[in-house]
Amino acid sequence: MTAAPSAVSVAAPNHARRLGIALAASGAVLFSAKAILAKLQYRYGVDSLDVLTLRMALSLPLFVLLGIRETRRARQRQALPSRRDLGLILVLGVLGYYLSSLLDFWGLEYVPVSLERLILFLNPTIVLLIGLFAYRRKVAAKEWIALAVSYAGVVLVMVENLRVQGEHVLFGSALVLGAAVSYALYLAMSGELVKRMGSLQLVAYAMVVSTAATLIHYLIARDPGGLLGLPWQVYGLATANAVFCTFLPVTFTMAAVARLGAGTAAQFSVIGPVSLVFLGAWVLGETITAIQLVGTAVVLGGVVLLSRPGANSVPVAPPDNK
């Protein structure tokens, strides 16, 4: 009579772990696929600001609903954000989802998706450097080795893309690196807020701020009528970007963290850059060379070293939550 409950108690954690792994892997691939959808939208004559504005505007209702739910939960816990917290959320929303996404989509006009994802994947190393220079935290020898390995891999892939695609790759890479730095600042500054508010509430609030900043930017720079009358394919791809490559990966990743823990869930983010190497070739016809594959493997190796439990002097969050 006692065997059945024991079997159920063993099966339940195993099921939760398998589900967590599936959610973490799916979230990593979906987040990375936003670059593919942006590249496809560019074929219809839109630019990075158009792509970002449509993405943010279409995902806004989903994040508003998420924010309402999380606010109700916070009210029940008597853990609503203070005025100081709201001020910091304004800064984080501009840094983490507006500026970072704008630079990322702008850079995608000049670089292949495989290189874009590798540069963004340097987020953990940039967070480490911010901890070194801004917070004067010590960096272990293994961390310096991981940093050197990661950046050597990016340089290798960048040099190969220069050979294959031309010098515009340098400008695009600089824009994407700026996006990575902006998002790393978001990660470094958001640690205390995540502890007080929870990651879902913070993400929902920050996305609302980011959407407002994006819309203000568009209204200043463009005629809002420019978003009307675009090819239907642009709206279809933008909707897919908002739902499947923005909102769902956030919720998938948070659900995976609940089942696996933050450290284990972060390990599955390595699937994103690898998937883009092949998705870019399959969907966009981008070239894959042996040097690019080697460089990708080198970068992933460095980030895995840096992400191992107990290997870091500063917290390393999952690199692609934009």
Image: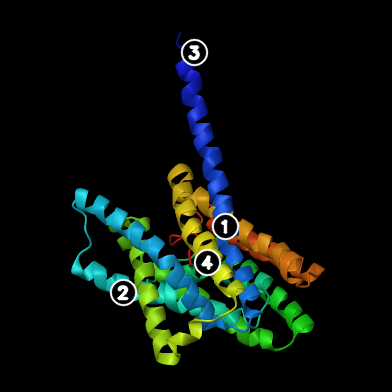
* Viewer-nearest residue: 271 or 223: 223
Q: Is residue 178 above or below residue 63?
A: below
Q: Where on the picture, by quarter, is residue 35?
A: bottom right
Circle 3/circle 4 CB separation < 8 Å: no
Chain-order first, disc 2 or disc 4 = 2
| C-alpha distance separating marks 1 and 3 | 38 Å
Circle 3: element type:
helix
How packed mark 1 is, by other alpha carbons closer than 10 Å (few <14, some 14-19, many 20 or more), is: many
Q: Name the residue under label 1.
A: 28
Amino acid bearing label 3: Ala
Circle 2: element type:
helix
Q: Which percent across, then down, holds residue 69?
A: 30, 53
Q: In this view, does 235 lie to the left or right of 94?
A: right
Q: Name the residue under label 2.
A: 90
Which quadrant would the N terminus be assigned to in this image? top left
- Say whether residue 141 is visible: no
Amino acid bearing label 2: Leu
| C-alpha distance separating marks 4 and 1 | 19 Å
Q: In this view, does 279 lie to the left or right of 220?
A: right
Q: Is residue 187 above or below residue 267?
A: below
- Say whether residue 59 is visible: yes
Q: Residue furthest top?
A: 1
Circle 1: element type:
helix
Amino acid bearing label 4: Thr
How packed mark 4 is, by other alpha carbons closer than 10 Å (few <14, some 14-19, many 20 or more), is: some
Chain-order first, disc 1 or disc 3 = 3
Q: Where on the picture, by quarter, is residue 42?
A: bottom right
Q: Mark 3 points at which residue?
A: 3
Q: Which percent across, then down, holds residue 321?
A: 48, 63
| C-alpha distance separating marks 2 and 1 | 26 Å
Mark in front: 4 vs 1? 4
Mark in front: 3 vs 4? 4
